Amino acid sequence: MAIKKVWIEEGCTACGLCQDICPEVFVVEDQARVIEGVDYAAFEAQIKEAAESCPVEVIRYEE
């Protein structure tokens, strides 16, 4: 199934790892945020890798 929604829960430490893995979907300023309007299905592997790599486990996605 394709990823339809991506979000970041409270607790982000703005480490930048998600942006390093998938800059097409994540941007880190004061905190990480998800870029709206992106075809998340096109970056499914990178989104899952970012979620699995997040040191505070706050990246979520919905298929």
Image: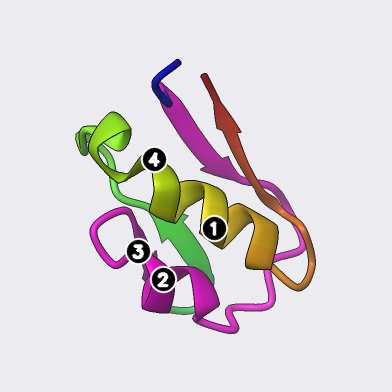
In the rendered image, which quarter contains the N terminus? top left
Q: Are marks 2 and 4 in contact (CB under 8 Å)?
A: no
Which residue is under mark 2?
Answer: 21
**Do we see residue 3 in this rendering?**
yes
Tag 3 secondary structure: loop
Tag 1 secondary structure: helix
Quarter of the image for residue 15 reads bottom right
Q: CA distance from mark 1 to mark 3?
A: 9 Å
In this rendering, is residue 15 above or below 53?
Answer: below
Q: Are marks 2 and 1 in contact (CB under 8 Å)?
A: yes
In this rendering, is residue 58 above or below 44?
Answer: below
Who comes first in sequence, dot 4 or dot 3? 3
What residue lies at 41% left-to-right and 71% top-to-bottom? 21
Numbered disc in front, either 1 or 3: 1
Which residue is under mark 4?
Answer: 44
Q: CA distance from mark 3 to mark 2?
A: 4 Å
Q: Are marks 1 and 3 in contact (CB under 8 Å)?
A: yes
Q: Position of residue 27 (x, y in %)?
A: 35, 67
